[in-house]
Image: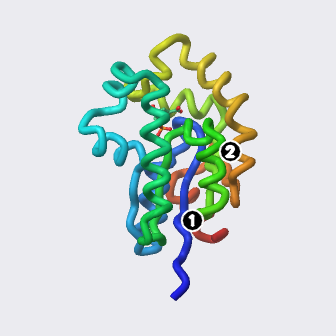
């Protein structure tokens, strides 16, 4: 039997990848995994701890390991949410392009700011003015998300259920 591809959600912090990934997986009867959670489980520590002890580089190494493990496992047919920086390594972009149906959940910087302001567990936003940081990251990352995406879905003016339905209609 031909294995169905994994569906992997990418996009900036605050795009709603975890919420929407869960909704999609429930509607499709597939397993859902949050890559950040997989990294935390593998490390036995949370993301702020990993950034503090190992720096961003250590976190990125763990992120690539977790992504490689997913695509090498022969389960397939699952839905994954990823962290906003998954596209930073060329190696990860190659893995995404070659092995999954990649959905880019687009959110404007204003929406990213609004949605991320409710929590303080993202180390990259603790280092300065969150708006300026999100803007700078977005300038670098938006073209990279587009480069790996099979599908681009706009999330700004939509409820998560409606975003999930758009993804489900399109795949
Ligand atoms: C990061 C985004 C986070 C998490 C880590 C780094 C980033 O995930 O992976 O804090 O580089 O944008 P979310 O996009 O789920 O917030």
**SS label for mark 2:** helix
What residue would you read off at disc 1? 165
Quadrant of res 153? bottom right
Q: Is residue 62 above or below residue 114?
A: below
Give the label on residue 118, or none: none
**SS label for mark 1:** helix
Q: Residue at x 62, y 58 (%)?
A: 102
* Nearer to me, 65 or 129: 65
Q: Is residue 1 left or right of residue 167?
A: left
Crowdedness near tag 1: few (<14), some (14–19) or many (≥20) residues, C-alpha within 10 Å: some
* Nearer to me, 156 or 131: 131
Give the label on residue 145, or none: 2
Counting from the top left corner in percent of width and height, residue 122 is at: 43, 27
Q: Residue at x 65, y 61 (%)?
A: 98
Q: How is the image coloured?
A: rainbow
Q: Is residue 98 left or right of residue 82?
A: right
Q: Is residue 71 left or right of residue 118?
A: right
Total marks shown come to 2
């Amino acid at each position: 039997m031909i294995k169905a591809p994994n569906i992997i959600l990418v996009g900036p912090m605050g795009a709603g990848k975890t919420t929407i990934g869960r909704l999609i997986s429930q509607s499709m009867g597939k397993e859902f995994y949050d890559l950040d959670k997989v990294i935390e489980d593998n490390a036995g520590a949370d993301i702020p701890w990993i950034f503090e002890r190992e720096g961003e580089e250590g976190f990125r190494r763990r992120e690539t390991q977790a992504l490689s493990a997913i695509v090498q496992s022969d389960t397939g047919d699952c839905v994954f949410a990823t962290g906003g920086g998954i596209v930073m390594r060329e190696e990860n972009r190659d893995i995404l392009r070659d092995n999954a149906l990649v959905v880019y959940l687009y959110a404007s910087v204003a929406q990213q700011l609004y949605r991320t302001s409710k929590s303080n567990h993202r180390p990259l936003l603790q280092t300065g003015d969150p708006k300026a940081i999100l803007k700078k990251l977005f300038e670098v990352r938006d073209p990279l998300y587009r480069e790996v995406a099979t599908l681009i879905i706009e999330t700004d003016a939509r409820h998560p259920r409606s975003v999930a339905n758009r993804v489900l209609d399109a795949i």
